[in-house]
Amino acid sequence: MSQEDLNILIVDDSPTMRRIIKNTLERIGYKNSIDASNGKEAIDMLKENSINFVITDWNMPEMNGLEFVTEIRSQSEYENLPILMITTRGMKDDVLQAVQAGVNNYIVKPFTPETLEEKINKLI
């Protein structure tokens, strides 16, 4: 899948972090992204849009990233959707928990554009 074909959903409760991720994606060539401030909003956006890649935070109100991933993984139409988690939670147990929930890859904040690009490329 080419960069132009990738429609990315960014899920983070911080408007600043959503903007940083969006700007970083654009810098590395990914122009198509929309964003949500929590998991509940993100589920609605998944249903309304043709999304083929998700970047989510862990710590969010209403529905956190782990609950969001668990919820979408329980639906067959999203079982192969690539999910990248970007979070401050860097403990080994956190990473294992995220992977068990269905996250395909994991980045600990802060991150570089190179790291983001490398992780996306591994998943598409």
Image (cartoon, rainbow, N blue to C red):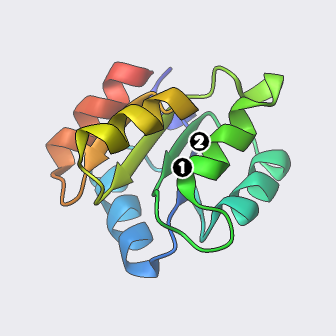
Which corner quadrant of the image does residue 34 belong to?
A: bottom right
Crowd around label 1: few <14 · some 14–19 · many ≥20 (10 Å): some
Which residue is rendered at x = 28% and y = 60% of the image? 88
Q: Which residue is mark 1?
A: 32
Categorize mark 2 by other alpha carbons within 10 Å: few (<14), some (14-19), many (20+).
some
* CA distance for labels 2 and 1: 5 Å
Residue at 80% over, 25% down: 77
Q: Is residue 62 left or right of residue 112?
A: right
How many numbered marks does the figure carry?
2
**29 and 122: which one is in front?**
122
Q: Which residue is mark 2?
A: 7
Amino acid type of disc 2?
Answer: Asn
The reply to whether dot 2 and dot 1 touch (C-beta < 8 Å) is yes
Residue 76 lies in what quarter of the image?
top right
Residue 52 pos. (x, y %): 62, 33
Q: Secondary structure at mark 2?
A: loop
Point out the residue furthest to the bottom here. Answer: 15
Q: Residue 111: which quarter of the image?
A: bottom left
Mark closer to the chain start, 2 or 1: 2
Residue 85: assigned label: none
| Helix, strand or loop for disc 1 | loop
Say whether residue 3 is visible: no
Residue 72 place in picture, x, y as percent: 72, 38
Residue 16: tell me if it is visible.
yes
Vertical placement of residue 60 versus 2, above or below: below
Residue 102 placement (x, y as % from top left): 55, 29
- Which residue is located at x 76 percent, y 56 percent? 45
- 89 above or below 80? below
* Residue at image location 23% in from the left, 31% down from the top: 118
Q: Nearer the viewer, residue 9 or 43?
A: 43
Amino acid residing under circle 1: Asn
User: Quadrant location of the C terminus?
Assistant: top left
